[in-house]
């Protein structure tokens, strides 16, 4: 009888313990856990790399020339700028802090920009209009910059695919610059029509540009959440707010001065397109997707 009573007591204690272990946590506990998780996800650091092409437009403000025509109007020799005609490239390290859809982003960038312009000169014999020489100069500039943009982002509603808008300011530091000039022409003064060409003039042009300039920017983009990785596609328009030409060294390059070239005062605009991959820096656990609630 005592053994039977002892077994009954052990069985009742075991059943009670098992039932307690299977009991669901109170609703308040689950709610607090979710609130803690959501609070964690409201704040996130992202870091990653982006690459892509860019296009540049140079806008002259004050024009300069070494050669001054005497028998036709000076504006006929003005440089003609080809905006957004040459493709450059850039590579960006993005570091972004997000809080409830609003992000502050620092994106140091190495950028190669290219733009072109042309100008023409004509010489003739006042006593014989048939005797004439026309020369055309095609200029291409390649400029390397280190950009330091500070950007504010706003994410729109979405889960896997999120559009966003962005705006900010940037400061660009000159790294290097090169200039290539192709010279072609037509000679009507030698009794016939002769097409002229020569080897391109290639010079280091870093001294012709200011060491830095600044500007403002705005753009849009898309985030695509793939597990714990975020794929990014964005585009921005950057407006230069200061002169990129070194006014002190405008006439300092003898080879360029010898072909009649002098840099105009100018500002540049850029269209920048980037694609990249970002990684979150904060995780709840190794099995948790930190970007999907």
Image (spheres, grey):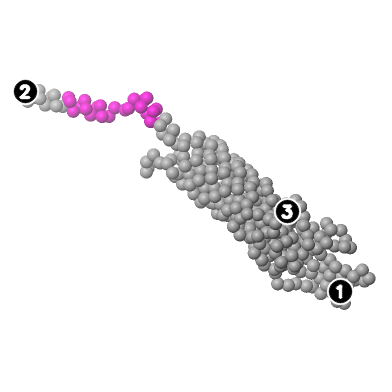
Toward the front, the furthest residue is: 248
- Between disc 2 and disc 3, the foreground one is 3
**Residue lying at 86% horizontally and 74% vertically, measured from the top left:** 189
Q: Which residue is mark 3?
A: 265
Q: Position of residue 192 (x, y in %)?
A: 86, 76
State which tag comes first along the sequence, 1 or 3: 1
Q: Which residues are magenta?
A: 12-34
**Residue lying at 67% horizontally and 59% vertically, measured from the top left:** 208
State which tag comes first along the sequence, 2 or 3: 2
**Residue lying at 73% horizontally and 72% vertically, measured from the top left:** 198
Q: Which residue is mark 2?
A: 2
Q: Is residue 204 magenta?
A: no
- Regarding mark 1 in the picture, which secondary structure is present there? loop
Q: Is residue 132 above or below residue 226?
A: below
- Regarding mark 2 in the picture, which secondary structure is present there? helix
Q: Which is nearer the eye, 138 or 169?
A: 169
- Please indicate whether residue 132 sits to the left or right of residue 62 in the image: right
Tell me the distance, in whole angstroms, between the alpha carbons under discs 2 and 3: 107 Å
Q: Position of residue 122 (x, y in %)?
A: 84, 66
Tell me the distance, in whole angstroms, between the alpha carbons under discs 1 and 3: 35 Å
Q: Are the residues tagged 2 and 1 within 8 Å (C-beta)?
A: no
- Please indicate whether residue 37 sits to the left or right of residue 52 in the image: left
Q: Is residue 289 above or below residue 24?
A: below
Tell me the distance, in whole angstroms, between the alpha carbons under discs 2 and 1: 133 Å
Toward the left, the furthest residue is: 1
State which tag comes first along the sequence, 2 or 1: 2
Toward the right, the furthest residue is: 127
Image mark for residue 189:
1
Q: Are the residues tagged 1 and 3 within 8 Å (C-beta)?
A: no
Q: Are the residues tagged 2 and 3 within 8 Å (C-beta)?
A: no
Q: Magenta segment, principal secondary structure?
A: helix
Q: Quadrant of the N terminus?
A: top left
């Amino acid at each position: 009888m005592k053994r039977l009573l002892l077994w009954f007591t052990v069985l009742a204690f075991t059943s009670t313990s098992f039932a307690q272990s299977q009991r669901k946590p109170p609703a308040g506990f689950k709610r607090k856990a979710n609130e803690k998780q959501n609070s964690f996800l409201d704040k996130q650091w992202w870091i990653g790399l982006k690459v892509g092409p860019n296009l540049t437009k140079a806008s002259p403000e004050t024009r300069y020339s070494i050669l001054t025509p005497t028998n036709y109007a000076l504006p006929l020799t003005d440089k003609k700028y080809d905006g957004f005609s040459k493709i450059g490239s850039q590579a960006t390290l993005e570091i972004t802090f997000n809080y409830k859809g609003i992000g502050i982003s620092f994106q140091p960038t190495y950028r190669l920009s290219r733009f072109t312009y042309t100008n023409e000169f004509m010489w003739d014999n006042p006593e014989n209009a048939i005797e004439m020489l026309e020369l055309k100069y095609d200029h291409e500039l390649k400029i390397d910059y280190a950009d330091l943009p500070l950007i504010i982002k706003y994410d729109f509603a979405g889960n896997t695919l999120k559009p966003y808008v962005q705006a900010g300011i940037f400061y660009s530091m000159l790294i290097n610059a090169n200039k290539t000039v192709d010279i072609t022409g037509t000679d009507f003064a030698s009794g016939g029509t002769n097409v002229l060409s020569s080897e391109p003039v290639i010079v280091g042009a870093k001294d012709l540009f200011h060491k830095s300039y600044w500007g403002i920017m705005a753009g849009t983009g898309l985030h695509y959440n793939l597990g714990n990785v975020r794929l990014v596609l964005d585009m921005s328009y950057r407006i230069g707010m200061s002169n990129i030409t070194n006014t002190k060294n405008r006439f300092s390059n003898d080879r360029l001065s010898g072909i009649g070239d002098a840099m105009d005062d100018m500002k540049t605009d850029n269209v920048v397109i980037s694609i990249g991959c970002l990684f979150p820096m904060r995780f709840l656990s190794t099995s948790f997707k930190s970007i999907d609630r």
